[in-house]
């Protein structure tokens, strides 16, 4: 950052980008309010700064979408309008992968090369694009575009996937899944919103939900049966009737039924939802965690794209039951279509009286604000998410205090992910006791699984807890590729590998725990016997190295050392013997588990260690 940033005069376009979020400055405004320190120097900060800082991320998004990168002039103007020190604004902008602080073209292509796309031709796609456009991170098409390799885009069921962002006065984003180099390049060459027409298959219900339309579904019952953008279609299928039922039975009843249901969080931690909703916590804010960034996981995205009104209705019930009047939905930055549909759903719900100051004339106040992430896996951790919304770097906080005591803006906060919340609709509709009869005693209700990789029909599947891994794979059409299964990764990059001999494991929290695995977020990635698992482990290690926020030493250093060690073994150049390297890897993993602040560092070695326990990937002398 240039120390003289404050001297840079913003151009008109830079001002317009910032003002699109903050509004035009008041008459007579002359560059922000400053306080004078004891030595007479101009300084930033104070109460005004704290009151507005939560707008920093939306402003940075507006700048990036309008200009293609965070320019010094726009950042300077942002600091003036929000009364922030330039160093702090720069620190936040540099934290997120989707933001750029260096000049780049207004058209940017991201091609996923993560674990699920690896099985579906990502390397071939990257190679063909590189032949046409040159190496990644270089200006192409006469300086009008550039491209990058990307971590998982959450489009695993239609891999290989790509995302193009088009900056300008009317910014837009195009999703390509499955991605074809000819279509991608045609889109990069297209002008303005014509580019969006190059990706007409942004959401194909049948490709994403193979069970769509089948009887017996609960969480996915409306997928493919309604127009996702029509509130009338949603209401015709029973939409918002569950909200009316919640109002008629009362908030205490709702909380009691949620507790009786045995519902636990579906994001991976499996914390009892009823405990979070305890009225004794006196929550002020409700947060829907839709920052679904675990490689191999896409179930929440599919729900938001296929049935967005259900998410809004579920949030409203949760807000009513817990006494919260304000809800924030923190959406993953790589989900443009989900963002469009959710924003439309919020608008329509307000117009029809399902959100606002007097919902359905019941005197209930609740509203939802959507906040978009910007490419940081760590922001899926709830306290990092709070920091991100508040306008700080998305770094996790120490616990305790826990969110139920000290959460968003320092107030007690309820946090649930998308799948957890839509289960509440089923609980209110059927009752907690009936919900508890579904699944098993330790894992109640239905569960969504994101199935991808070498499988015949990848997509999101709904099954009751207790179905085996084998049954899920058969439901998805069996193993594709060579047809011979080598491994399954459960729970995504932070999960565990299981072998073909463990396919009869019940998909429950207790069932997976019994074999030393985790259910996690419900990701199920299949690998046939043509895959070099060593390359998969290297990709996972690289992912955690890149996504570590760097706040704590065990994770910041451990993820780097883990990848370096695996690279040495893969190249057959260990320091000492292979056995000594593997022992060192165990020590690194233990240090990360014991001393990392959050779950990222604590699980960064889980998949690697599980694979090394089940397969001899690095024999002596390899």
Image (cartoon, rainbow, N blue to C red):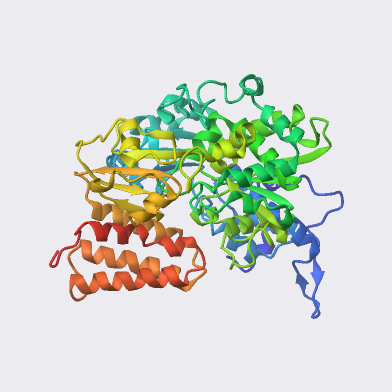
- The residue drawn where x is 39% and y is 65% is 559
Asked if residue 188 can be seen in this view, the reply is no
Location of residue 544 in the rendering, given as x and y in whole percent from the top left corner? 41, 59
Camera-side residue of 565 and 37: 565
The quadrant in which the C terminus is found is bottom left
Q: Relative to 216, is 90 above or below? A: below
Provide residue 112's location: percent of width, then percent of height. Answer: 38, 44
Which residue corresponds to the image point at 54% horizontal and 45% vertical from the top-left?
333
For residue 491, above or below residue 199: below
Q: Observer-nearest residue: 449 or 43?
A: 449
Q: Total of numbered circles in the picture?
A: 0
Q: Is 495 located above or below residue 476 in the figure? A: below
Figure quadrant of residue 423: top right
State whether residue 118 appears in this view: yes
State which quarter of the image contains the N terminus. Answer: bottom right
> In terms of depth relative to the viewer, which is nearer, 349 or 192?
349
Question: Measured from the top left, where is residue 218 in percent x and y?
Answer: 52, 30
Pick the front one: 328 or 17 = 328
Question: In the rendering, at what x and y percent does residue 602 appear?
Answer: 44, 64
């Amino acid at each position: 950052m240039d120390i003289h940033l404050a001297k840079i005069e913003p151009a008109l376009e830079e001002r317009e980008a910032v003002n699109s979020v903050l509004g035009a400055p008041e008459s007579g405004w002359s560059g922000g309010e400053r306080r004078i320190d004891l030595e007479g120097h101009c300084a930033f900060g104070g109460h005004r700064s704290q009151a507005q800082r939560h707008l920093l991320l939306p402003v940075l998004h507006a700048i990036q979408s309008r200009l293609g990168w965070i320019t010094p002039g726009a950042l300077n103007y942002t600091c003036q309008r929000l009364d922030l020190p330039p160093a702090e604004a720069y620190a936040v902008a540099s934290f997120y992968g989707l933001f750029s602080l260096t000049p780049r073209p207004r058209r940017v292509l991201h091609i996923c090369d993560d674990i699920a796309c690896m099985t579906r031709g990502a390397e071939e796609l990257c190679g063909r694009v590189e032949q046409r456009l040159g190496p990644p991170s270089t200006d192409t098409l006469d300086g009008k575009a550039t491209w990058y390799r990307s971590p998982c885009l959450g489009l695993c069921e239609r891999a290989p996937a790509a995302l193009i962002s088009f900056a300008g006065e009317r910014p837009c984003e195009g999703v390509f899944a499955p991605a074809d180099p000819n279509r991608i390049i045609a889109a990069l060459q297209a002008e303005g919103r014509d580019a969006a027409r190059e990706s007409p298959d942004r959401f194909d219900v049948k490709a994403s939900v193979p069970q769509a339309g089948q009887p017996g579904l609960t969480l996915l019952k409306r997928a493919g049966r309604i127009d996702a953008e029509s509130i009338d279609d949603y209401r015709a299928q029973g939409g918002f009737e569950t909200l009316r039922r919640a109002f008629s039975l009362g908030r205490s009843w709702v909380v009691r039924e949620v507790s009786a249901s045995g519902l636990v969080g579906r994001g991976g931690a499996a914390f009892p939802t009823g405990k979070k909703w305890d009225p004794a916590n006196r929550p002020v804010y409700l947060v829907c965690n839709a920052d679904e960034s675990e490689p191999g996981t896409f179930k929440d995205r599919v729900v938001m794209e296929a049935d967005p009104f259900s998410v809004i209705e579920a949030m409203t019930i949760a807000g009513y039951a817990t006494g919260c009047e304000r809800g924030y939905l923190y959406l993953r930055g790589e989900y443009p279509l989900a963002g469009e549909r959710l924003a439309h759903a919020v608008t329509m719900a307000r117009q029809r009286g399902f959100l606002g100051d007097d919902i359905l004339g019941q005197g209930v106040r609740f509203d939802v604000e959507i906040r978009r992430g910007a490419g940081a896996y760590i922001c899926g951790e709830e306290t990092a998410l709070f920091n991100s919304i508040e306008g700080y770097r998305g770094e996790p906080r120490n616990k305790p205090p826990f969110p139920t005591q000290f959460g968003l803006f320092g107030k007690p906060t309820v946090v649930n992910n998308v799948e957890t919340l839509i289960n509440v609709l089923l609980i209110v509709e059927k009752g907690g006791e009936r919900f508890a009869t579904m699944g098993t005693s330790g894992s109640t209700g239905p569960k969504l699984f994101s199935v991808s990789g070498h499988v015949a029909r990848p997509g999101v599947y709904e099954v009751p807890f207790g179905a085996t891994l084998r049954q899920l794979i058969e439901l998805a059409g069996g193993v594709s590729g060579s047809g011979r299964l080598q491994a399954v990764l459960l729970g995504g990059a932070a999960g565990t590998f299981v072998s073909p001999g463990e396919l009869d494991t019940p998909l429950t929290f207790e069932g997976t725990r019994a074999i030393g695995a985790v259910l996690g977020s419900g990701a199920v990635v299949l690998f046939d016997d043509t895959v070099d698992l060593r390359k998969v482990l290297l990709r996972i290690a690289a992912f955690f190295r890149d996504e570590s926020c760097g706040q704590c030493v065990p994770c910041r250093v451990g993820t780097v050392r883990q990848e370096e060690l695996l690279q040495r073994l893969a190249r057959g150049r260990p320091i000492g013997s292979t056995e000594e390297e593997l022992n060192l890897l165990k020590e690194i993993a233990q240090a990360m588990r014991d001393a990392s602040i959050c779950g990222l560092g604590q699980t960064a070695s889980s998949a690697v260690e599980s694979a090394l326990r089940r397969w001899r990937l690095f024999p002596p002398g390899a």
